[in-house]
Amino acid sequence: MRLCRFDDDRLGVVMGDEVRDVTPVVERLPARRWPFPKGDPLIEALDDLRPAIEAEAKRAPMRPLAQVKLLSPVANPSKIVAAPVNYRRHLEEARADAQIHFQKQVAEIQQIGLFLKATSALVGPSEGVALRYLDRRNDHEVELALVIGKRADRVPAADWARYVAGYAIGLDMTIRGPEERSLRKSVDSYCVVGPWLVTSDEIADPTQLTLSIAVNGEPRQKANTRDLVLGLGTLVELASSFYTLLPGDIILTGTPEGVGPVRPGDVMNAAIDGIGAMRVEVRAA
């Protein structure tokens, strides 16, 4: 199943080039009062709601996919966890390019671990990326995004798949500079996730997915998740050893070589096997 959030926070099921509006199912979620619990209630209840979503989709009105505004399929992650330099060739290019490393040692992921992006950076593909600090280099980084489906605390690597609700395309946008990663990568709109959530049962082997991005039609990055330095299970194990992962939390698994700058007016087209493709426009903030 492919679930999207679109327009004014409508819930949709994507079928081919159409969206079935299944928003009435959201009314089945339990009422929440302040202080609101952390995590995304829709993702948390997804397994229980799935029969109702599938039934509603059969009778729901249809809209052409091209006519809707696609938001992030996850509305309320408690955190966004990201994996730096998790492809060997990207580590090599980061060490070789002064505009990336800024005279700082680029260490291996086994040494530096993971980092967090602010949840306020999260947008969907139709919202686009609004660049800040235009006098500095702003780069695209395409990644496979994991969406956690249930509470995960100190999960063994072998059990990682049981805790994943689904997958999406992620863009970990980056301002280059000497500051810490989390600051430079947490700008508003610098975390694009979409175009929808593909539930885990739809992806036979997420460790063998080709991902790519082109800017204005020019191919920039292309790799396969089999080339990750730390595999998906190791990433979930590592993240959950430091933080309790909650439903809706997003793990960006790392970007391959070929990162490059984008400027206002550019158009990014990112794709991952089994998930689909998303078009993201770039503008000045």
Image (spheres, rainbow, N blue to C red):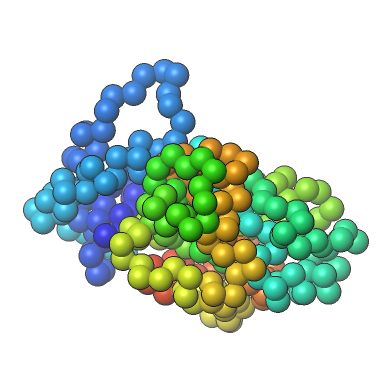
The residue lying furthest to the left in this view is 59
Q: In this picture, is 81 found above or below 29?
A: below
| Residue 46: quarter of image | top left
The count of marks equals 0
Q: At 73% from the left edge and 51% from the top edge, which residue is drawn?
A: 181
Q: Quick one: 216 or 277, which is closer to the camera? A: 277
The residue lying furthest to the right in this view is 103
Q: Quadrant of the N terminus?
A: bottom left
The residue lying furthest to the bottom in this view is 218
Q: At 78% from the left edge and 48% from the top edge, which residue is drawn?
A: 180
| Residue 10: quarter of image | top left
Give percent across and percent down for residue 21. 21, 51
Whether residue 250 is visible: yes
The reply, left or right, for residue 240 in relation to residue 58 is right
The reply, left or right, for residue 259 in relation to residue 232 is right
Q: Quick one: 88 or 191, which is closer to the camera? A: 88
